[in-house]
Amino acid sequence: MDADSRSLLGLVLAFGPLSLVSIGGGPAVIAEMQHQSLAHGWMTQQEFTALFAVSRVAPGPGALLAPLIGWKAAGWLGVSVVSLAFFVPSSILVYGAVRVCDRWRGSAWQRALEAGLAPIMIGLVFASAYAVLRSEADYAAVWAIALFVAACRLALPKLHPLVLIGLSAAAFPLLNGT
Amino acid sequence: VRYRTGVALPWGIDDDATVSDNDNSRRGRRVNLPELFFAFSWLGLSSFGGGVPAWIHRAFVERRRLLSEREFAARFTLARIMPGTNVVNLAVLVGYRARGAFGAAAAALGLLLGPTLVSIGLVMLYDRFAGSTLGTAVVKGAAAGAAGLLIAMAINAATPIVSKLKGRVEGLPSAPFALLTGAAVFVLVGIVQISTLWVVLCCSPISIAFFFLTSGSSSARTGNGRR
């Protein structure tokens, strides 16, 4: 098998299973995406950080980080392969669920699913934020910005998130004296 | 209407949705496949920084009257519970309601295609300026801010659990267990760096089973006052 198809196979094997455990969506599995991207040598940490930033600034769901990783790893073919591997399994699962869920909707099972998965989603999202921040650990400014943005978002929920990201982008070069 | 993850939506999450499907099976006109595709394309491309579920609600509940409030609430709950991107799941469920399997595919494809192309364009643009120190610093700052938004999202989702711990919210049993589970998942995935796959596969059955067993006993205690 040549390098290209090995890379495509790696993308499918990484993103297919991830699709089915992405509880609460893309943010829950960013830590794992970063780990896989670096372990497979698809990109450098700096490139991953850039893709993460783009996926949060661009329109559409933040889960588009996945096709962007495919693009970096294997071009347009990578985008197609990752999109299918990451979005199709979970879509089929929810499609199947809506066809059977009428029977258990509002039941104790649904409440248990919701209550039981919520803490796991919360832990995963914290881990994702930590994974992104840890990779820039040398910069106290990175942590300061992240915590400041989190505080602003909680205190001022009406402020558009893009404003906060824009301020962060401007603040880091200033704080770091670039 | 603005939407933040972990915050109750204005239309609420409805437990009594079982009656709705029959009541509202003949609502409004039918939505065809191209209309689904382009409506979701527009929703995807115009959604900066989240808030898509609120726009889907406006487009398909308020304007096109494809779903009733209750149907939408039930589908939104399902989209959040199931794995996968919430918005993509919701698109699949709304598209399915409109046009079956093809509708689901058209809605999800519409939602993802445009934004994917825009994002790749942005990455290409970034790659042209990747060498410059200023470009790198700007992107690092943006990434730090985006990570801060993730922290806020997780804190928002954890707020009801903490309120329950302080005895302010009824109906959410076992807050200490939930906090412990969340902390354990964070430590295992974030610090020990065990694969997310294994952590989720091991922790979620335990957590769901725990809440299933405890909610059964708590609803028995309160005499199951919901209905």
Image (cartoon, grey):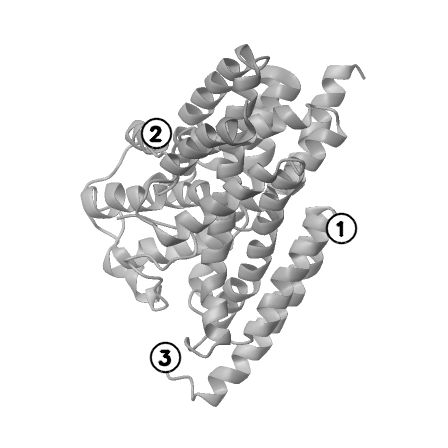
Mark 2: which amino acid? Answer: Phe
- Do the residues at discs 2 and 3 belong to one chain? yes
* Residue that label 1 marks: B192
* Residue that label 3 marks: B226
Query: What residue is at 52 percent from the left and 52 percent from the top?
Result: B82
Quadrant occupied by the N terminus of chain A: top right
* Residue that label 2 marks: B37
Query: What residue is at 57 percent from the left and 65 percent from the top?
Result: A116
First in residue order: circle 3 vs circle 1: 1
Q: Nearer the viewer, residue B42 or A171?
A: A171
B58 lies above or below B188: above
- Do the residues at discs 3 and 1 belong to one chain? yes
Q: Position of residue B70 (x, y in %)?
A: 29, 59
Horizontal side of residue B213 vs B14, given as left or right: right
Mark 1: which amino acid? Answer: Val
Query: What residue is at 56 percent from the left and 21 percent from the top?
Result: B136
Q: Position of residue B201 (x, y in %)?
A: 69, 55
In front: label 2 or label 3: 3
First in residue order: circle 1 vs circle 2: 2
First in residue order: circle 2 vs circle 3: 2
In front: label 1 or label 2: 1
> Which SS class for mark 1?
loop
Instruction: Please say whether residue A91 is visible from this viewpoint.
Output: no
Among the 4 quarters of the image, the one containing residue A176:
top right
Mark 3: which amino acid? Answer: Arg
A155 lies above or below A73: below
Q: Nearer the viewer, residue A56 or A21?
A: A56
The Cα atoms of the two marked residues, 3 and 1, are separated by: 42 Å
- Chain letter behind tag 3: B
Instruction: Please say whether residue B122 is visible from this viewpoint.
Output: yes
